[in-house]
Image (tube, rainbow, N blue to C red):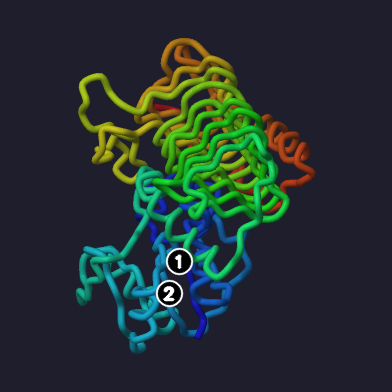
Amino acid sequence: MNYYLFDHPVIHTQLLPLTYTRAGAEIRVGISTILEKWEAFLELKPSILPISYLEDLYPKVDNTPGVYINATLCPDSALLQKIESMSMGDALYLDKILIVYKGSRDQFDRVLIQSMEGSFEEVQYPDAILIQHPWDIFKLNAQQIRADFNRITSNRKSCEISDPNTVIYGKENLFVEEGVKVKAAIIDAENGPVYLGKNTEIHHGAIIRGALALCEGAQISMGAKFRGDTTVGPYSKIGGEVANSVIFGYSNKAHDGYLGNSVVGTWCNIGADTNSSNMKNDYTNVRLWDYQTERFADSGDMFCGFIMGDHSKLGINVMVNSGTSIGVSCSLYNSNYLRNFIPSFSTGSADGISTLPVKKALQIAEKVVQRRNKELTDAERDNFQKVFELSARFRKQ
């Protein structure tokens, strides 16, 4: 049976700016990306069916009948059993959102359109874990760290931390991969698991409270304070005070400053002493820009920091208000609080925002990835231009 992870058009838009540059399946929540979770459960690599303008970033997909799974649906054993029991032509929904369809590509396309138009045969799967909005990523992160931790570490033996000056609480909830370096840290895994991926490093004096996922090659800076429920994606360098946040990968926040209830994309940089608010003074729910409705939407929680798209940068001493959405390839610096919605390819401060030309944005991106011995592909370069054009109307507001 073939398996396909499809981008739902409405959810794709709701998850902007994070999905400007990736299919939903490549969102990281917990230790793994959603794609990696499905690979582990299915024991094969499913194909990705992205939104149309992202198609060049992924291998072409044939039209062989199979199982079409919503790209932001997180798997578990019960869901997998339910999918295996489905017959051809069956569909599952969460409320009015199509989450799984089994059948031909033509039938799938029809069912998806019908469901978006409100016409469908309703077979609900209320236990689905579906990422629909950016804030769902950090809200579900603790749950997904625990689920991934149990899956990844099952029947495996952890490596040891040999440093005599590191203090560990709840050692049974700590898993250490090969090549990990820890110096004079405090690691408390009593209330949540701590996963230290291959070749990760925790520098002197860091204080870590689980749940924490430190993915391959990532580093935690000297004296950092991690308050729990946080994921540091591959090859990121993160310091300061961090709580309930997800950094996708290859991003830096190496210095002091607070980051809470936030999501940071790839290839981002957050300057020294930059701080984010994650709660309003009146204790009401935080509102965040919704690209689907093109207005601010209730996050459903009083704790919500900021969302940052790929390749964006914050200078030193920047103040970011609660409920701020920062697009792709933005370059922002200090001067009072930034506005709460920063369109992609914007540069400036609270005193004024102008357009960052796509040519300049590409030059910056090329330099950044080269520092990690990587290069942008032609498809990724082309995507910069596509995102620049798709986001142009927001910069004119």
Residue 248, picture quadrant: top right
Q: Point out residue 240 in the picture as x, y percentages from the top left corner.
A: 54, 26
For mark 2, give the secondary structure.
strand
Between residue 395 and residue 14, name the one nearer to us.
Answer: 14
For mark 1, give the secondary structure.
strand
Q: Point out residue 288 in the picture as x, y percentages from the top left corner.
A: 33, 35
Callouts 1 and 2 close, C-beta under 8 Å: yes
What's under tag 2, amino acid-wise?
Tyr
Q: How many marks?
A: 2
Residue at x-position 47% and y-position 52%: 30
**Picture layout, residue 346 above or below residue 42:** above
The residue indicated by pointer 1 is: 6
* Label 1 – label 2 distance at C-alpha: 7 Å
Instruction: Sort mark 2 into few (<14), some (14-19) or many (20+) by Cα contacts within 10 Å.
Output: many
The earlier-in-sequence mark between 1 and 2 is 1
The residue indicated by pointer 2 is: 68
Residue at x-position 50% and y-position 16%: 349
Residue 138, picture quadrant: top left
Q: Point out residue 122 in the picture as x, y percentages from the top left corner.
A: 20, 74
What's under tag 1, amino acid-wise?
Phe
Q: Point out residue 139 in the picture as x, y percentages from the top left corner.
A: 35, 45
Tell me if residue 179 can be seen.
Answer: yes
Compared across the picture, whether 337 is left or right of 296 comes to right
Instruction: Sort mark 1 into few (<14), some (14-19) or many (20+) by Cα contacts within 10 Å.
Output: many
Compared across the picture, whether 177 is left or right of 244 comes to right
Q: Which mark is residue 67?
A: none
Residue at x-position 46% and y-position 39%: 209
Give the position of the C terminus as an image quadrant. Answer: top left
Between residue 264 and residue 386, name the one nearer to us.
Answer: 264
Residue at x-position 33% and y-position 40%: 290
